[in-house]
Image (cartoon, rainbow, N blue to C red):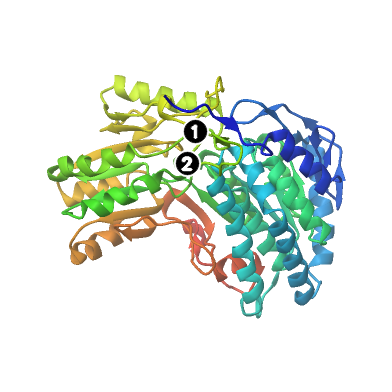
């Protein structure tokens, strides 16, 4: 009989909220958060209700601004930018360094907010915070050479990012952009991360970093945050539909842009025998329920190896652990080490579950379907945002699971017989951020890898966004605009020599 679990004392949402109010009372008021613009925390916007994906309980919702107020916020950010760009680099470095010290001091609270707001397991939430802090420290230590001969942009950088990595992607980018001499604007993701971003922004604003943080619908705010002439660069992380609309807007007006979009990242298996190595990596690919832009939801497998692939794959999937990220058996127990918790919300779990059912109805073969009965949950807990792992063989081409990233714990497998079929299946989404190919023969890898349309390709191991000096971008429809990572992130948000062409994926008209 499974033990009865309890919520670990001190980790409730009310505990986190009271700590936020005590640390940053200027940003957290009563039962709502405030927007930050014109250097002040503003009690404007219509606060929407929100619930935690962890258990469906109420949490703070975004105070949504209207379009006219967003335009005021952008104009005020330009004033901040014009002052900040003339602040000497040593002072900018000191202020960003002080912000990192403050983030480090409140590391555990930032991680706890990520658990409640976006459902990250505790260990992954801590890693998200740590990667942001450690990554920006690297830039603080190396920024002098990166800025040699370069100047800030003419206007602030506008950041529109998805909810899955508020710290290691969004806050990281904002602080590096500010270090390079730019004011920064960020829109809080609609689906989660609001309080974590508000606390991080409050700590940065206290150190004099010119941060603007606003909430609102994309449709309401995009005109101000994308098309405003005051904006010097648009940085976007999210899906292809929204990214395509932003790409059209920024291309039309010739605005600097960094648009990271999703792609179907694939793992190919061809003439391969090291099944123990593959089995060891499978559970790691389930980190955060594959709700990552660099997740691997598609395996392209040589038909002759399918039986051996399944013998390595299925036992590994059975070891994947899910459940309530803060549930323990005894008050003194450490928080559980889970591979993933809930999806971002119940609507996403239902949508993905419906897609799985429809794919099976149309001919996909279910190879594995997990059960929430195997998860770690509190008695009577709402589990509507949770989805156990599912694996489907040969999803029909009419299914979204065939050509798009599911952003959840659903794997699909496609069988192939020739190298040409392997490459076609691995390139099904017109560009990806990462891919991997498992093959015993180095020459085969060297011949096939350059034909895989992914920015990073690993041999028998997963690739990731990377940290510090590692570059990142995408091919095809997975990326538009300047590449980032290492020195390229700084180059993307600064002006260099006249006529400079930034490394990136740009329309042909830019060539």
Q: Work out whether residue 232 can be spotted.
A: no
Residue 464 position within the rendered picture, expressed as x and y whole percent measured from the top left: 44, 56
Whether pointer 2 and pointer 1 mark residues with C-beta atoms closer than 8 Å, the reply is yes
Which residue in the structure is indicated by mark 2? 338
Q: Earlier in the sequence, mark 2 or mark 1?
A: 1
**1 or 427, nearer to the observer:** 1
Q: Secondary structure at mark 1?
A: loop
Q: Residue at x 29, y 44 (%)?
A: 299
**361 or 340, nearer to the observer:** 340
Residue 335 position within the rendered picture, expressed as x and y whole percent measured from the top left: 55, 42
Tell me: residue 100, above or below residue 63.
below
Which residue in the structure is indicated by mark 1? 323
Label 2 neighbour load within 10 Å: few <14, some 14-19, many 20+: many
Q: Work out whether residue 435 can be spotted.
A: yes
Tell me: residue 170, above or below residue 328.
below
Residue positioned most to the left? 304
Inter-mark Cα distance, 2 to 1: 7 Å
Residue 294 position within the rendered picture, expressed as x and y whole percent measured from the top left: 44, 50
């Amino acid at each position: 009989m499974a033990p009865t679990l309890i919520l670990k004392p001190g980790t409730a949402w009310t505990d986190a909220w009271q700590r936020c109010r005590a640390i940053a009372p200027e940003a957290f008021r009563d039962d709502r958060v405030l927007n930050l613009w014109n250097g002040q925390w503003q009690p404007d916007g219509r606060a929407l209700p929100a619930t935690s994906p962890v258990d469906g309980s109420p949490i703070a919702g975004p105070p949504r601004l209207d379009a006219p107020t967003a335009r005021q916020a952008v104009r005020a950010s330009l004033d901040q930018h014009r002052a900040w760009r003339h602040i000497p680099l040593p002072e900018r470095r000191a202020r960003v360094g002080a912000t990192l010290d403050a983030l480090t001091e409140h590391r555990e609270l930032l991680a706890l907010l990520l658990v409640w707001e976006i459902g990250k397991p505790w260990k992954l939430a801590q890693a998200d915070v740590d990667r942001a802090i450690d990554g920006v420290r690297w830039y603080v230590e190396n920024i002098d050479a990166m800025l040699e001969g370069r100047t800030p942009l003419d206007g602030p950088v506008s950041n529109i990012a998805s909810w899955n990595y508020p710290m290691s992607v969004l806050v990281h980018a904002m602080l590096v952009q500010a270090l390079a001499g730019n004011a920064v604007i960020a829109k809080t993701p609609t689906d989660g991360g609001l309080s974590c971003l508000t606390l991080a922004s409050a700590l940065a604003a206290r150190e004099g970093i010119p941060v603007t943080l606003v909430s609102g619908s994309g449709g309401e705010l995009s005109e101000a945050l994308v098309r405003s002439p005051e904006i010097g660069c648009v940085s976007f992380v999210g899906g292809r539909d929204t990214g395509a609309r932003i790409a059209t807007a920024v291309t039309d007006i010739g605005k600097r842009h960094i648009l990271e979009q999703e792609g179907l990242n694939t793992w190919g298996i061809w003439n391969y025998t090291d099944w123990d190595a593959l089995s060891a990596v499978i559970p790691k690919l389930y980190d955060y329920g594959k709700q990552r832009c660099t997740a691997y939801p598609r395996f392209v497998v040589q038909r002759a190896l399918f039986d051996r692939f399944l013998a390595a794959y299925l036992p590994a999937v059975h070891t994947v652990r899910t459940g309530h990220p803060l549930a323990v058996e005894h008050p003194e127990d450490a928080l559980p080490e889970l591979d993933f918790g809930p999806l971002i919300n119940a609507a996403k779990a239902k949508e993905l579950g419906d897609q799985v059912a429809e794919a099976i109805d149309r001919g996909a073969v279910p190879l594995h379907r997990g059960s929430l009965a195997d998860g770690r949950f509190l008695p009577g807990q709402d589990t509507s945002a949770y989805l156990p792992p599912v694996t489907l063989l040969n999803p029909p081409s009419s299914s979204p699971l065939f050509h798009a990233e599911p952003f959840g714990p659903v794997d699909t497998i496609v069988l192939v017989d020739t190298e040409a079929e392997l490459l076609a299946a691995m390139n099904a989404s017109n560009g990806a951020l990462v891919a991997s190919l498992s093959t015993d023969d180095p020459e085969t890898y060297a011949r096939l890898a350059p034909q895989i349309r992914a920015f990073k390709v690993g041999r028998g191991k997963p690739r990731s966004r990377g940290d510090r000096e590692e570059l990142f971008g995408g091919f095809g429809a997975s990326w538009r605009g300047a590449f980032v990572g290492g020195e390229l992130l700084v180059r993307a948000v600064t002006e260099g020599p006249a006529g400079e062409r930034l490394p990136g994926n740009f329309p042909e008209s830019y060539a």
